[in-house]
Image (cartoon, rainbow, N blue to C red):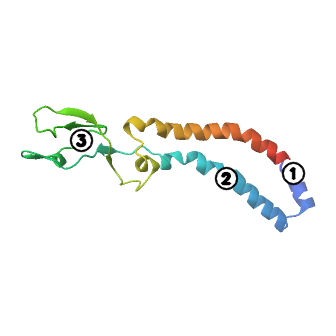
Amino acid sequence: MVNQVDVLLSQLGTGKWNFLHFIVTGLATGMPAPHALSGAFVVPRIDHSCRQADIEYGNYHSSDYKNDSCTYLDQSDGEDLQEEKLCTEWDYDNSTFTTTITSEFDLVCQKEYIRALYSSLYMIGVLVGSPFIGYLSDK
């Protein structure tokens, strides 16, 4: 195989057009990798906690308690009974990523399945698109 490549290069030469072709081919083959691996950086799992208004309950403040990540105990009516409610807003741990699709669109708790859907839809696009791109490249 190496001898065949040497013979081919000695006949064609190593001019600027071969170098340009090599660069363009390298770019085209290197482009899919970052897109396939982007899910780890675009839609990562982020630590989060339920955000609620700072409400005072006698001697206690709601900010004194670390809430569960998806629910909180509501005692806003002043009674001793606490009702568990689903969160509508969250505080995110931004120590690793300052902003992501996960935090921008609140893809946590009931919407967490959308994070997995991102990768699945990308791979379905690759599965459907690859044969057509191969066909178009031959035309």
- Who comes first in sequence, dot 1 or dot 2? 1
- Position above or below: 63 against 117: below
Residue 87 lies, in percent from the top left, at 30, 40
User: According to the image, label 2 marks what residue?
Assistant: 30
Residue at 46% across, 35% down: 113
Instruction: Give the Cα distance between marks 3 and 1.
Output: 68 Å
Residue 7 lies, in percent from the top left, at 90, 55
- Who comes first in sequence, dot 3 or dot 1? 1
- Position above or below: 39 against 84: below
- Pointer 2 local density, CA inside 10 Å: few below 14, some 14–19, many at least 20: few
Residue 11 lies, in percent from the top left, at 93, 60
Residue 86 lies, in percent from the top left, at 30, 36
Instruction: Kindly indicate the quadrant of the structure image that contains residue 97.
Output: bottom left
Instruction: Kindly indicate the quadrant of the structure image that contains residue 88.
Output: top left
Residues at discs 3 and 1 in contact (Cβ within 8 Å): no
Badge 3 amino acid: Asn
Instruction: Give the Cα distance between marks 1 and 2.
Output: 27 Å
Badge 2 amino acid: Gly
The residue at the far bottom in this view is: 16
Q: In the drawing, does residue 101 fall left or right of residue 95?
A: right
Instruction: Give the Cα distance between marks 3 and 2.
Output: 44 Å
Residues at discs 3 and 2 in contact (Cβ within 8 Å): no
Depth check: give the residue in front, 14 or 101: 101
Depth check: give the residue in front, 17 or 48: 48
Badge 1 amino acid: Asn
Q: In the drawing, does residue 134 fall left or right of residue 107?
A: right
Instruction: Kindly indicate the quadrant of the structure image that contains residue 121.
Output: top right
Query: Which of the numbered marks, if any, corresponds to residue 3?
Result: 1
Residue at 29% across, 44% down: 49
Q: Nearer the viewer, mark 1 or mark 2?
A: 2
User: According to the image, label 3 marks what residue?
Assistant: 67
Residues at discs 1 and 2 in contact (Cβ within 8 Å): no
